[in-house]
Each structure stands twice: as C-alpha cells, then as structure tokens.
Image (cartoon, rainbow, N blue to C red):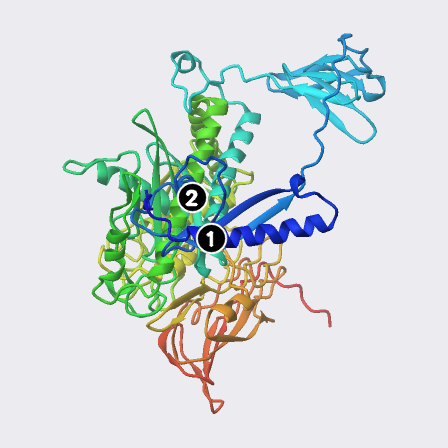
Amino acid sequence: SGFDEDQDPSASIREARLEHLAEKARSTLMKQGYSRESIVIEKYLNMRYQGTDNAIMIKESKNANVQLPYAKTFVEQYHREFGFDLEGRDLLIDDMRVRAFVPGATLTPPPAVPLIGPPPPAGSTRAYFENGWETVSTYSFDDLTPGHEIKGPAILFQSISTIVLEVDCIALVTADGDLDITVAPKKNDNDTKFDHGKEEEEVEIKEDPVQLSIYAHRFMGIAEQMGRTLARTAISVNIKERLDFSCALFTSDGGLVANAPHIPVHLGAMQSAVRFQVEYWNSEGREGIKEGDVFVANHPQLAGGSHLPDITVITPVFHDGKILFFVAARGHHSDIGGISPGSMPPHSTILKEEGARIVAFKLVKDGKFQEDGITDILVNQEFGGTRNLKDNLSDLRAQVAANNSGIRLLQQLVKDNGLANVEAYMHFIQHNAEMAVRKMLKDFASKHGKRAHAIDYMDDGTPIELTVDIDPLTGSACFDFEGTGPQILGNINAPPAVTYSAVIYSLRSLVGQDIPLNQGCLTPIEFKIPPFSLLNPSDDVGVVGGNVLTSQRVVDVVLKAFKACAASQGCMNNLTFGDDRFGYYETIAGGAGAGPTWDGRSGVHTHCTNTRITDPEILERRYPVLLRRFGLRTGSGGAGMHTGGDGVVREIEPLRPLVMSILSERRCLRPYGLEGGEGGKTGRNLLIKKGGIVLNIGGKRSGSINVGERLVIESPGGGGYGERSPTPP
C-alpha cells in the first residue's frame, strides 16, 4: 500500500511540532477572549510520495483505532486522484498546518407550518422544461405567506431575482419566509454507476436539439476539466505553463466525441492512437485490455502519434467487464532524449535520433504505476535518453490523473442520465458534425463548383498539392494529395494522422456553426495520400518537424483551396535549448492571415498550435536565460484591403553556455496573400555575436551559444486579403 504499517519514524517529532503549533493558535484565540474549552483544533500534514512532486493536504483522522491514519488517508486520496498506487515508496511530509477555530452557534430550525395550499398565481407564461414547452403559472414573492406550497413546473419572481421551479419539484414557504425546495429524484435514477437495464435498452432515444447542445457542452466540459487537472498536477513548464496538451473523450471503438479547445494538431491523431491501442492489445497473442490498465504511446507512424515528444496516455472506462468509453491525454514532453536538448532536432533524418519511441506499453497495470518499465524506455536510447526524467514521470502521472478525473465525471454523467442516453448522444453529436460538414461542402460546390485545388511549397521546394472533388448531392468529398513531393531526408515528413488532424481542424473552422470538433467531421471525407510522400512517409524517417511545420502548411493549403483566407505564418517557430542536465521547448507566435471581412491578428499562435508562450518571469526564474526583447514585428503582415497580422520578435541571451536549436519554416517563401492581397514577410533567425556581428542562421539550425551572444527570432507575418485601395493623389 506504499507504506510500512509497523513504522512511523516521524511520529514523535511530528506530534510535538503539531502540538506546538496548536498551542500557538489556541493562545491567539484565548487572547481574544475565548475559553480553552471552546476552541477546536484541526491538524493537517502536506504529504507526498518520495520522488514525486504532487503533495496532498491530509487532515488528522478522529478514528483512534486506525494505525497510521495520515498515511492511510493519503494513499486513499492519492489513488482517487491519480488512479494508481506507488508501491514501496516512503511518504514524506512537506509541511504541517494547524487550524484553530471556535464553532458558531447552531441555528435552530424554524418551526413547522401548517400547509395552506398554493397561492393564487400572478399570471402564466410559456416556458421550456425537460418535457418540452409548457404553459406554467407565475407567482410573486409579495403574495407568498408561510405554509404556501407550489408544485413545479412554475416560475417565482421578485424585484431582484427569479426562481424557476423544475418539473416535479415542490417549494414550501417556511415560517421565516424562506423557500424550502424539495427536488424530485430522477425517474430512472439508480444506485449503480451504469444502467444496462432491459427497460432502458428497449426505449428508442430520439435526437433533441436542446439536449444535443447540452450534451455537447457536458462532454466538452469533461474534457476541459481533464485539462485543468493535468495543468494542476503536472510539474513541467511545457504542460503547466504553456498548456501544450490535449484531452478528449472517445467511444468504445475509439471514435473522437469531444475535446477541450486545446491543441488542434493533437486531436485527429489522438483518435488514431486510441484505435491502434485497441487493435494492438486485442490482437492474437497479446494480453488484452483489463480494468486497471492505462496505455502509453508516442510512435508517429505506427501508433497514431504526432511526433515523439507528444506522449499519449489512454485509459479505458469499464463496467461489468465491458469497455464503454476511452479517455486520453496527450502532452508535449520537453525532452525525451535524442541528439539535441529539447528533443526537437533541426537536422534529424531518422526517427530514433528524435528520442524515445513507444509503440505500446502499459503505463499502469493492475492499478500499479510501472515506473521501472517506462524509465527503462525513456533512458535507454541509442542516441541518448531523456534529460528530464523527473519531469517526464511527473507529467505522465499527471496525465493518468487527468484521465482518472474524466472517468469520474463520465461515470457521474451516466449515473445521472443513464448509459443509453449518454451513448446515444455521443453518436448524435458525431452525426451532427457530419451533417454540418456535408452542408458546408454542398454550399461550397453550389457557389464555386465541384472541384477545388491548391498548392503550396515548403522552404526546400517540396510541394503540398491538394485536389478536392465534392459530390454536390451527398456532400461527400475526396481529398487527394497526389502531386505532393516525396518524403525527404530530414524531419518535416508528416505521418497521415497529422494530415487528418489538419483537415479536421480546417473543416471545423469552415463550418458556420458551433459544433464540437469530433470524428463526424471526417466521416464524409475520403483521403488519398501517396505512399512514401511527405504526408505518408515510411516508419523510420524523421518526423519531428512534420507535426509543427508541415501541419501548418497543410492547413494553409486546405484553406486556400476553399478560398477562405490568406496564409497565416505557416510555422510554429520551434525553439529549444538546454544542456546535458535539462531541455526546454517553446513555440513562438506569428501573424494570422486576413480574410474577406477581417484583418489578421498579430502575435498569435495560429491554426494547429494553440499553446501559450512561457511568461518571462517563469522563463527567467526556471532557466539560465535572459529575455532581452519580446514584441510585435511591426509591418510584417501583408498589405491588402484587409491586412495580415504582424509576427513577433523574441530575443534570448543565455547565462551559461547552452545548445540552442531552431526548427522553423517560411524563412524563404512568404505566406501567400489571397484575392490580390500581398504576402506576409518571411521570418528570420539571427545570431548576434559578442562583437556585434549578425549572422543569419537559416530556418533550421542547432549549435552552441555562449554567454554574451543573443538569438533573435523574427516570426513571419500573415498574408493580406483583397487588393489594397489605391492611394489618392
């Protein structure tokens, strides 16, 4: 259970210190006139497992019969929060806390009043309740007296508030004039987590637009809560501060249902990752998927990953031995080994140079965190293991905790609404997204024809070409990337999952209504991606840049084909630095493309990235660097009727010798303008030497930088849209 019940080496000194704190707090209250007997003392320990960073505040148990009560409570709460145990670990006390207080007087409940029935209604109105539209009575607070009883549905109002009394609820006016509302239990509620009752299965559930919106927000809310748990429990700057992660819910077959608005490039790929794990562990000769299992993977070509630093943690949701759903959290780890600190090498050519590769591993097995196994994977690599093992392990535990919070919320949702309803609306939401995309494609075909085409080029000249053929009757479409260049001897190759992510994001952006981004967006789409091309490479080539650079260019190509807007910066400006002790990674904002009715935004993370950038105070406190300059690159956006957004300038100086690497695009070819708009300015990466010599180091470079030297990143601007009005003479 993580502790030895025969030993408590801290007991004597701990109790002495707690009692010392208790006496100080007690004395403070006694000086205010309270008696010693009236003061209540509560004692707390802030505890954590040895080797972890997440402490939990534990209150002293009042049960004198429990041996090691603090330890027992800690292990129970840790398992509830994270979903696993850490066996054989000592428990550490970070700090102690004592709370002293004097309880207030207990309020005497008001006397019962005789019931006098409902008051006369003040009027009536039409209102929408769970059973649909109803004509309901309205009541004024001024007309209510003790003993009045009102049955819902009804509406009660006064000058400063309105109370909506739901169906089957009862409001009673108490002797004090308060309103005591009895909430009726749900008709199909039960004491189990999931209801597989025959009665529920036989009821046909019809799609309701109001419920569809409610469930869509509930699912998204669960994913958002998973993200908050991940940010709260993670330790790395990359996840805790930059929020470089995504959380999502999936059906039992691995179809994406809903996600929080996190990182678009993760989301289409996460679905592929979930489905791969299901197929892998259920294949012949494997041990299958069991309760208490949590899977981890990152391989881009084989396991539905995006690039190696993005590690996905997947947890099945079971009931009665059956998998009902999956939850998953993907986070960018700032270092997982490879040839350069930060695991984003600009010049890698093969996958194993980019860090640890995980095809399929049970991170948690039978409820136990497999620390030795995952450590072996992360450390023992041909081109060097992780430089941040402590952060890796802490963030992986946080990802499991995020999934665990999603499971609890899903279980509560099913308990409140029934399994059949939840499953039905998961599929309704996917179908709704499918219909929205089909409508968008039909509308486009009616205005612009059945075929759309676009081409753009990477800085090395490799083309990305797209032809879209639309069926105007069904709204189906074929996205054919024939004409895209071959895979390259480098790392801007992008696995198919990245292309799916870029397309699903683009389609969701083109749809003119608010829908969750999910698998339904891709249901009408057929993909044709040439094998061994830039967008469908072999499983051993470098891909670390494909996820962060090529994905942006795929979005630009899709939006260009649909005549939606000018190109955004088309890059994530990936900066890494570190040494043999640490690695740091960030993406840098740029300019967004302008559109038919808007100017491009300046200094924003665009399209497939949606991260923050590390706050200057945190950057300089946690890492040996100074941030010399960070601001907009004025005038870098393309001119036009609507102007493209400006890029940014970021200047960093090391405080000790470091290895710095930049992996970027749009350093040669400008982000395109559309409909006569001018292109945005290309980016530049500059090294300023001690003597003031300025070197243009190109788009992809890794090397040492010494104290007194500075790296300057100038990110690209967005393209302009429409011809600029002529300047009057």
Q: Toward the viewer: 626 or 638?
A: 626
Instruction: Give the residue type that dot 2 points to.
Output: Phe
Which of the 4 image quarters holds residue 616?
bottom right
Q: Residue most toward the left?
A: 285
Instruction: Give the residue type that dot 1 points to.
Output: Arg
Residue 545: percent from left, percent from top? 35, 62
Which of the 4 image quarters holds residue 493?
bottom left
Residue beneath the point at 36% across and 45% down: 270
- Whether residue 60 is situated above or below residue 727 in the rendered picture: above
Q: Secondary structure at mark 1?
A: helix
Q: Which residue is mark 1?
A: 14
Q: Toward the viewer: 412 or 712?
A: 412
Which callout, 2 or 1, points at the residue further toward the start of the chain?
A: 1
Q: Nearer the viewer, mark 2 or mark 1?
A: 1
Q: Toward the viewer: 152 or 258?
A: 152
- Whether residue 101 is situated above or below residue 581 in the rendered picture: above
| Residue 6 visible | yes
Q: Secondary structure at mark 2?
A: helix
- In the image: residue 280, left or right of residue 124: left
Label of residue 384 in the image = none
| Label 1 neighbour load within 10 Å: few <14, some 14-19, many 20+ | some
Q: Which residue is mark 2?
A: 74
Residue 466: percent from left, percent from top? 38, 51
Q: Residue most toward the front?
A: 36
In the picture, which quadrant includes the C terminus? Answer: bottom right
Residue beneath the point at 49% across and 35% down: 219
